[in-house]
Image (spheres, grey):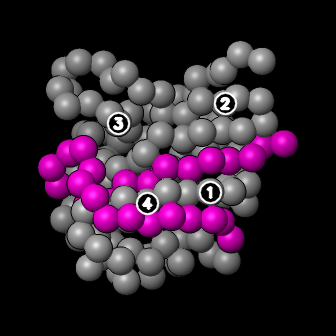
Amino acid sequence: MPKVIVQTSTAPVTGFTDKSAPSPLAQAIRAGDFLYISGQGPLDPSTKEVVSADIREQTKQVLKNLLAVIDAGGGTLAQVVNMRVCLRDVADFPAFNETFREFMAGEKVTRTCIGGTPHRKGVNVEVDAVVYLG
C-alpha cells in the first residue's frame, strides 16, 4: 500500500530553517491504518512564528496544530496511540503536563517526554504522534 501525504493549512509545515525554502517534511503520512504525524511546534499556522514564550501557551498551540493534522488525516484524538514530546527545559514539565492533561480531557495515550533542543529558536516544546485509523 502506498504512503499518502496528509497536509492542512490549519497547521504549519515545520522542519525548515529557511522559511523561503519549502520544507522537506510532510505534516503527516498515512501508511495503511496508521497516521504518522511530524513533530508539531508552537507556531501560528498563518505567520509560522512562535505564538508565545510561555510554555502553557506553546503547549496549547502545539496540541491545536497536532489536532488539526490528525483531523486532516481522518482521525480523532481518541485514536492517538502514541506521542513523543521534546521539552527544551525539563523544568517546564509540570506546566506542560498540566496543560497536556487539560487538553486530553481524559483520553489516554502512551507518551515519552524527553529534554532536548527543538530545531528552532524560541520553540520550547515539540510533539509528534502516531494515530491508529483502523
- SS class, disc 3: loop
Residue 10 appears in the rendering: no
Foreground of the two, 73 or 85: 85
Q: Mark 4, mark 3: which one is toward the viewer?
A: 4
Residue located at (49% from left, 72% from top): 100
Residue located at (53% from left, 71% from top): 103
Q: Is residue 79 above or below residue 47?
A: below
- SS class, disc 1: strand
- How far is disc 1 from disc 2 in space, using C-alphas? 15 Å
Residue located at (29% from left, 73% from top): 90
Q: Amino acid at mark 1?
A: Asn
Quarter that holds the N terminus: top right
- How far is disc 3 from disc 1 in space, using C-alphas? 20 Å
Question: Label for residue 30?
Answer: 2
Instruction: Choose the circle earlier in sequence order: 3 or 2.
Output: 3
Q: Mark 2, mark 4: which one is toward the viewer?
A: 4
The residue indicated by pointer 3 is 14
- How far is disc 1 from disc 4 in space, using C-alphas? 10 Å
- How far is disc 2 from disc 4 in space, using C-alphas? 20 Å
Confirm whether the magenta stretch covers residue 132.
yes
Question: Label for residue 82?
Answer: 1
Label 2–label 4 contact, CB within 8 A? no
Quarter that holds the C terminus: top right
Q: Residues within 10 Å of mark 4 (few under 14, many from 20)?
A: some
Q: Amino acid at mark 2?
A: Arg
- How far across and how far down the image is residue 102, in percent? 53, 78
Question: Label for residue 111?
Answer: none
Q: Residues within 10 Å of mark 2 (few under 14, many from 20)?
A: many
Q: Is residue 106 above or below residue 26?
A: below
- How far across and how far down the image is residue 73, in percent? 65, 36
Q: Quadrant of residue 114?
A: bottom left
The residue indicated by pointer 4 is 85
